Structures are given as structure tokens and as C-alpha cells.
Amino acid sequence: MRLSQFFLPTLKENPSEAQIVSHRLMLRAGMIRQQAAGIYSWLPLGFRVLKKIEQVVREEQDRFGCQEILMPTIQPADLWRESGRYDDYGKEMLRIRDRSDRDMLYGPTNEEMVTDIFRSSVKSYKQLPQLLYHIQWKFRDEVRPRFGVMRGREFLMKDAYSFDIDYESARRSYNKFFVCYLSTFARLGLKAVPVKADTGPIGGDLSHEFQILAETGESQVYVDPRLLDLDTEARQLGPDDDLAAFVDRVTGLYAAADEMHDPAKCPVPEGELQTRRGIEVGHIFYFGTKYSTPMNATVAGPDGTPRPVEMGSYGIGVSRLAGAIIEASHDEAGIIWPDAVAPFDVGLINLKPGDAACDAAAQDLYQRFHNAGLDPLYDDRDERAGAKFAEMDLIGLPWQVVIGPRGAANGVAEIKRRATGEKIELPLDAVVARIKG
Ligand code: 5CA
């Protein structure tokens, strides 16, 4: 993509409405545009990041045997009357009436709908377990939407649902998502800590939140330092491994959010306990038969008698992650994208467009990047060097490659790693290999 043709409405000034750094940087980097309180359009740069996050989340769900479906955003109120949540959900639910005066709603979550899909077609324990997920927009009419996409009213969620015959099997499903989440967040370049949580309006009695650690996080968490090193181990585990052993060990380590932290009960010595800020990017729930009983979602067990199916639900805030990743990875100059979710792999800066040697060298590299399967953003605009560098730093691509008249004459480019600021000069034909690592 050539920057001269790319739709990238960056801002020079800090937008006054943005209170936190990710919101500020997403607006300044032209990633999103607010359309109403807590409702955003995703512009090309932001959309690319959102799709990358979504894809990592999808691949990890698939790896653990969860099947993708797509349920609608609009749901009939009658399903929610069956579970009893239509009245309970209160003002957070956006209620709509269609032309035939039927009560509808914009889904804030999908337990009822997926239970309806399940009960209409699964009749025997032999068809279990079933794990289904979708990645779909949700609407919650939050009292105080704020912090950009971190607390929106319309937001993109990956929500998965498990169906099992009994408690033991349901725990195995829960464990799969537990490990899948740690692996997903590690792939996204994040440190995520599982913290025991309240179940709120989803219900049930077993629940964990996944908090990623960032100085600007909304909640305070107190964690055993051993919880900060689970990334590699989680990525190596798959659905057929002994996940219970891993989950039992991890959940045995101390982790508590502010309201649950009790220094008297904390087994970690004060000097070792990590007090950090966290952002909730995922939340998993086991709630047994809370929906299957009232909605009559039963399957025949081995003895032929019908019993309500055991369920859990598992959410990841996909659009929130775009903001959360920035909170965890930025500096004064702008965003620092982890490789896995960067909107482009490399920013190619031509310092002197119009100069034959610079144009030829830049064009040659642009082609080499494409040939190597890298996705470059080529700054071919006639702008001051300082402005070009500042904009590249702001949008945070992992690598910058700079071609100037001196380098072009000598057949070299300067390469900068955005995360460390480290710069080296390399011959043009060594650039691709360096970036591909
Ligand atoms: N049905 C369950 C699990 S699928 C559920 O809805 N859980 S939740 O309420 O905890 O939401 C799942 C995730 O969505 C949260 O962990 C958070 O990352 C994200 N999320 C929730 N509310 C918002 C919001 N207003 N804006 C952005 N992301 C949100």
C-alpha cells in the first residue's frame, strides 16, 4: 500500500475528549472515528488491526476444537423471557420493536440464542461435548461509555459456549478455554493473568477474568510472580494434553482483584507479591444448568433419561483488545504494535520522492517485500523527513526502512526496530532477510 493513496486521517494535536493513551493514539493514528457515544467506525488502519486480532483469536479457538458459527445481532425478546433475563438485564439492553410490534433486542451476549440452537438439534449425550463460538458485534447501553473502544456501547466480542453431559466433562471444557485464552493472549504479545472473578449477570459459580497488565489498567490486581511466566507453557499445550493438572496448578497461585485482595490471607511474601494494573480482556464462566433448565435444553443420558445440559460461556473483548494492546505497548512517540497484530509489517520511507535513485531503491524494496509475503506501507509522499518519521512512529509498525539519497547511492537502507529504537544500516538485498528474522 502506498501512503499517498492510503486513507489515513491522522491528527497532529491530542484530541481533548480522550482521557487515556490508547484512545488518544487510536484517534491520532486515524484508526477509529466516533459516531455516537461509545459507537465507532473502524478506518483502514484500525480495521486491519481488528481483523488481525480476530484472526489470532479464531485460530486459537479452532485449535482447541471450538467450531465457528455466526448468530445475528438482533434477537427476539421471547428467548430472553424464557431464561428470565429479559427483565433482569435492565437499561443496558437496547430494546427494539419491529413493524409487527414484536419485541426484539440488540444482543448484549448470546447464552439464550445458542441454547435455542442447541436444544433444537442435539438430543443425545453421544453428540457431546459441543463447543461453539462466534465473533459478532454486541450492544450494551453502558451508563458511562468511555476510554474509546475499551468501554464502548457497540463492541466486537468473541463469545463461545460449551455443552456437556455432566460436571466433570464441563470442567474439561472450561479448562480448554482457560488454556486457550492464555495461549491466545501470549500470541497477541500480551501478559495475561487469570484472576478468580464474580459472575455478575451471566451467572454461575465458577469464573475467571483474564487481565492484561498495563500501567494504565482500570483495576488493581495482586498476583503471584509465577503467574507472569505462563506464556510459553500455555502455547505448547493442546486440547488433548492433561489440562486439569496445568489449570489446577495455575489457579492454585494467588491472584486477586482489588475488592477480593486480603493481605492476611495472601500466601505470597510481601516483597514478592506483584501489585499491578490490569485490563479485563477475557472472562470465562461455568454456570451449569442456569439456562438449560428454564429453556428445557435436555439430552438423553446413557440410561435414556433426559437431563439438562451443562453449560459455560467464554468471552474475549476483540475490539477492546485493540485499545488494551496499545495501553500495554506504546511510548511518547506513539503505538508499538506487536508483530502478530501490526496493520502492516513494515513502513518504507522514501526521504526524497522524485529523486531517481531513491525512487528506484524504494520501489525495488517495495517489490521485494511483496515477493517475500510481507505487507509494506510505502511512504512515497513529498513531505518533510521529520513529519514522515513522526507519522511512522505514531502508527507503530514493527519495522521502519528508510531510503535517502546517500543510502540509495551506496545501495544501503537504514532499518529501525520500532520497539527498541535500534537502527542499523544494511545492503538493500539483506533487508528482507533481517525483517523476516
Ligand atoms: N457471555 C459472557 C461470556 S461470552 C460475557 O458476555 N462475558 S463478559 O460480559 O465478561 O464480556 C466478555 C468480554 O467482552 C469482557 O471480558 C470484555 O473484554 C469485553 N467487553 C465487555 N463489555 C465491553 C464493553 N462495554 N466494551 C468493550 N468490551 C467489552
Image (spheres, rainbow, N blue to C red):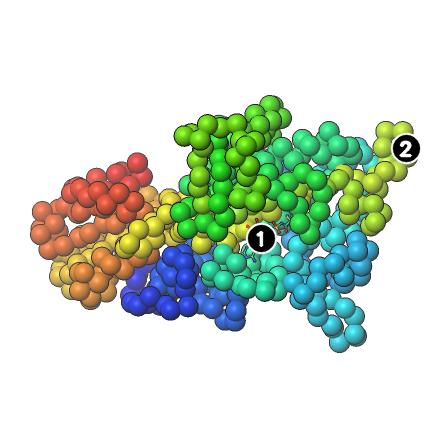
State the residue at coordinates (17%, 64%). Answer: 384
Cα separation, mark 1 vs mark 2, equals: 37 Å
Q: Which numbered dot is residue 210?
A: none
Q: Nearer the viewer, mark 1 or mark 2?
A: 1
State the residue at coordinates (75%, 40%). Answer: 288
**Residue 403 seen in this snapshot:** yes
Callout 1: few (<14), some (14-19), or many (20+) C-alpha neighbours within 10 Å? many
Q: Quadrant of the C terminus?
A: top left
Q: Quadrant of the N terminus?
A: bottom left
Q: Amino acid at mark 2?
A: Gly
Q: Quadrant of residue 362?
A: bottom left
Residue 407 is left or right of residue 235, and the answer is left
Task: Name the foreground residue: 260 vs 308.
Answer: 260
Callout 2: few (<14), some (14-19), or many (20+) C-alpha neighbours within 10 Å? few
Vertical placement of residue 280 versus 390, above or below:
above
Residue 241 is left or right of residue 193, and the answer is right
Q: Which numbered dot is residue 304?
A: 2
Discs 1, 2 touching: Cβ within 8 Å: no
Instruction: Residue 72 in the image: state x and y as whole percent.
Output: 67, 59
State the residue at coordinates (67%, 65%). Answer: 91
Instruction: Residue 63 in the image: state x and y as whole percent.
Output: 57, 36
In the image, farthest residue toward the bottom: 99
Vertical placement of residue 58 versus 382, above or below:
above
Ligand 1 within 8 Å, label 1 CB: yes
**Residue 183 seen in this snapshot:** no
Q: Amino acid at mark 1?
A: Met
Q: Which numbered dot is residue 157?
A: 1
Task: Name the foreground residue: 107 vs 84.
Answer: 84
State the residue at coordinates (27%, 55%). Answer: 333
Residue 376 is left or right of residue 314, and the answer is left
First-in-chain label (1 vs 2): 1
